[in-house]
Image: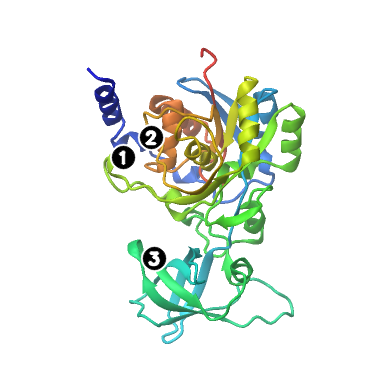
Amino acid sequence: MSSETISAQTSTLFDDVELYDYTLPESLIAKEPLPNRDASRLLVLERGGAEVQHRGVSDLPELLSPGDCLVLNDTRVLPARLIGQREKTGGKWEGLYLGQTESGDWRLIGQSRGYLKSEEKIVLTPLGDFGDRAILPLRLTLIDREAEGVWLMRPDRSGDVVELLQEFGTMPLPPYMHRKVASRSDWERYQTTYARQPGSVAAPTAGLHLTESLLNAIKQRGVEIARVTLHVGLGTFRPIGVQSLSEHQMHSEWCEVNQETVEQIRATKERGGRIVAVGTTSVRTLESASVDGILKPFRGSTSIFIRPPYQFRTIDALLTNFHLPRSTLIVLVSALAGIESIKAAYAAAINERYRFYSYGDAMLILPSKSK
């Protein structure tokens, strides 16, 4: 039997989306952050193993080894959630900013009662408190529709899109948090402490646990810090809507690995250190930049779908949160740790009443000590 046939048969074994499903009690969904970022619990799992350790995120420095390299995604979440009304009817409208075209038009998804027509206008008013500064409403004109419900809308004034979103948008919290307008706490906590590059419509949530003091302790341990960028898109957290992974069309996201990070990672590998990715977004970025087996500088879109069986080329370990069932993220961590290991870990986390999803607790997946 050829290696190609064996590979195809192995892929089929892991193709059913039902393998990545689980039942989570509603009470374990974290709807608010803990008072302190690094106070979350940390479940530690070896790749391919079934036993877990119950630790805390604050233990991370001692769980890493001198010579390792921790890779952060420095994307910054945009206040991309918009709330307005239809100018003609006064009907409510809600939308999510997805990006901008070269001509300056906005790409959005939105919902309202009734069908929006071409040239119809949406009126946005400021959502924040800007003191005595008067801010005129912003009008968006519908000019076209793209695939998958995406609208092209033209703002009635030019300006830096990040500044406009700061005035008219709010943080794009996941639906399970049950609040449309982010609280003052969300503006700080749904953002990593090291966020630099604006562009995401969702947070790279594993990084939400890391404080400046914790990162300093990690550095003092002799662990190097490297940075990549991946702007998290809408498709990241969506459940897979087909029965087979092979039928799933992966969303595309923009990412970058620069030369400095490439050199840091190469040096880590040469000295026998481990590459520890913070979040699945860092994994996707690094693996996209090493598709031929060698990590190289990369800048552009990626639609990489990491699913079992997958041979990881760059990363060795992963700090991650607990993910939604039937999502591409739980598929990715299953490719790294093994499906049965992830099932056992998630069952243990539920039994120990860990907090799940964006504001929830974390998991550290380490290489097996037997390898």
Decide which of 333, 300 is in the foreground and name it. Answer: 300
Relative to residue 188, is residue 293 depicted above or below?
Answer: above
**Separation of residues labelled 2 and 3 (CA atoms):** 27 Å
Q: Write down the residue under mark 3.
A: 150
Quadrant of the image occupied by residue 216: top right
Marks 1 and 2 in Cβ contact (< 8 Å) = yes
**Separation of residues labelled 1 and 2 (CA atoms):** 8 Å
Q: Write down the residue under mark 1.
A: 245
Q: Earlier in the sequence, mark 2 or mark 3?
A: 3
Q: Write down the residue under mark 2.
A: 307
Decide which of 228, 173 is in the foreground and name it. Answer: 228
**Separation of residues labelled 1 and 3 (CA atoms):** 24 Å
Q: Earlier in the sequence, mark 1 or mark 2?
A: 1
Residue 336's disc number? none
Query: Which quadrant would the N terminus be assigned to in this image?
Result: top left
Q: Is residue 195 left or right of residue 18?
A: right
Q: How many marks?
A: 3
Relative to residue 299, is residue 334 depicted above or below?
Answer: above
Mark 2 is surrounded, within 10 Å at the Cα level, by few (under 14), some (14 to 19) or many (20 or more) other residues, namely many
Residue 366 x/y as whole percent: 55, 24
